[in-house]
Amino acid sequence: MLANLPADLKSQRPRIAYLLSQYPAISHTFFLKEILGLKQLGFQVETASINPPDRSASLLPAAEKLESEQTYYLKTLGFGKILTTLCRILLRDPMVCLRGLRAALALFRWDIRGELYALFYLVEALLLGEWMRCRNLQHLHVHFGGPVSTVGMLASQAWSFSYSLTIHGPEEFYEVEEFYLPQKIEHARFIFCISNFCRSQLMKYADPDHWDKLRVIRLGVDPQEFTPITAHSTEQVRIVCVGRLVPAKGQLILLQALNKLISQGREIHLTFIGHGPDREHLQQFVDRHAIGAHVTFCGALNHDQTRQRLKEANIFALASFAEGVPVALMEAMAMEIPCVSTSIAGIPELIRDKVDGLLVPASSVEALTDALDQLIADEALRKRLGASARVRILNCYNLPRNLQLLAAAFEQCLA
């Protein structure tokens, strides 16, 4: 704990600015855990966010509320504040504005809409850099490779401080040019990748001279927070799926598999935790096939509520078409809930098929139906896979241990 660290060690830890797209956010609790964990390890981390929290202050848990009070929000600044800050920067540091403008124009691709966005990002970059200058912060770290890291890259070039990235995927790998991924790799001081698959995708777009910037630093969950559940022996098997309701999560495939299993006489119930634009489409499928008694849509739940729902689960299912390495899977695995997911991206690095869970080809209703049916029918298999899954988390995706690795990587890279 931070309180037990020697004072001289605390003072030696790097000071880092974190830029996030939205902080705090109910779907990205790993941001909070990472930042609080680094602070406990003696790092001085200050946070900036493009967007305000996704909930009002009254709905934020105590730790998130405190973080929000200490975070600099770019999009909540009024027009007058933005204008006076930009004028001050222009008068005091015209070279900063010139370097920033040159960097923004370098992103020009004969696309007026894209260039306008680059100029908007430049405004945010100048505001971010001014905040960092006032806080005497010399290094910026950014999660994700989309627009938020475009702001970070432009800020770094304008203000001449270093920046680094944590890349999750998969969106960055589909929109390589739109997200200026090769430029970001070139300009970043170092990049943390959440899986070997993630690192391989960056290698596709990076000059080999930059490959040594890419380090695999895995995410994780706290096994003391997510503890094994008591096995449920009920006639109705309860399946839980956690994730935003979007096509990429494959929830419709999961519903199709559920419908097949119900038609075969299986007593099962599926609970979706999460919200998103695909909710109406999924509900239409449920209504059309008259399986409403077997499906519950909970909407977005906070961390504690989600964990409580997981305690009632017999099986965790995630039929995603595109992922990084889902923290939701890690949480279920730590609780010894047997998991079924798809063999895509970094998931096979987390779940070894038939060892820590079952993996099926993405998009295959038949394979998903068979895998779920195996688990429904075989309680001993559920117990074996669940126990192995927790060991996997303890050994490879243990958050306290991986935070130590992250801290060591920061210290080495910033030395």
Image: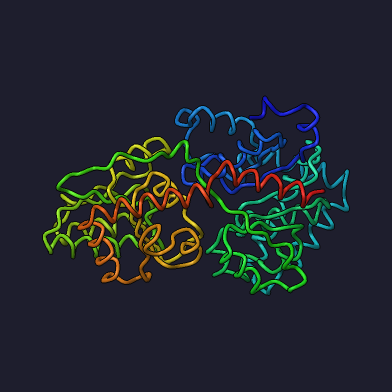
Taking depth in this image into account, of 249 and 343 the one nearest to the observer is 343
Taking depth in this image into account, of 166 and 264 the one nearest to the observer is 264
Can residue 84 be seen at all in this image of the molecule? no
When the figure is inspected, residue 11 is found, relative to residue 274, above or below; the finding is above
94 sits left or right of 390 in the view: right
When the figure is inspected, residue 105 is found, relative to residue 64, above or below; the finding is below
State the image coordinates of residue 102 (x, y, percent, origin top left).
81, 63
Q: Which color mode does the image show?
A: rainbow
Residue at the image point whose x is 82% and y is 41% from the top: 88
Residue 216: image quadrant is bottom right
State the image coordinates of residue 137 (x, y, percent, origin top left).
78, 41
247 sits left or right of 172 in the view: left
State the image coordinates of residue 346 (x, y, percent, origin top left).
51, 63
Taking depth in this image into account, of 72 and 319 the one nearest to the observer is 319
Can residue 143 be seen at all in this image of the molecule? yes
Taking depth in this image into account, of 227 and 94 the one nearest to the observer is 227
Task: Give the quarter of the figure containing the N terminus.
Answer: top right
State the image coordinates of residue 9 (x, y, percent, origin top left).
77, 33
Residue at the image point whose x is 46% and y is 62% from the top: 347
When the figure is inspected, residue 343 is found, relative to residue 19, above or below; the finding is below
Residue 228: image quadrant is top left
49 sits left or right of 88 in the view: left
Residue at the image point whose x is 58% and y is 33% from the top: 68
When the figure is inspected, residue 196 is found, relative to residue 31, above or below; the finding is below
Residue at the image point whose x is 59% and y is 49% from the top: 21
Count of marks placed on residues:
0
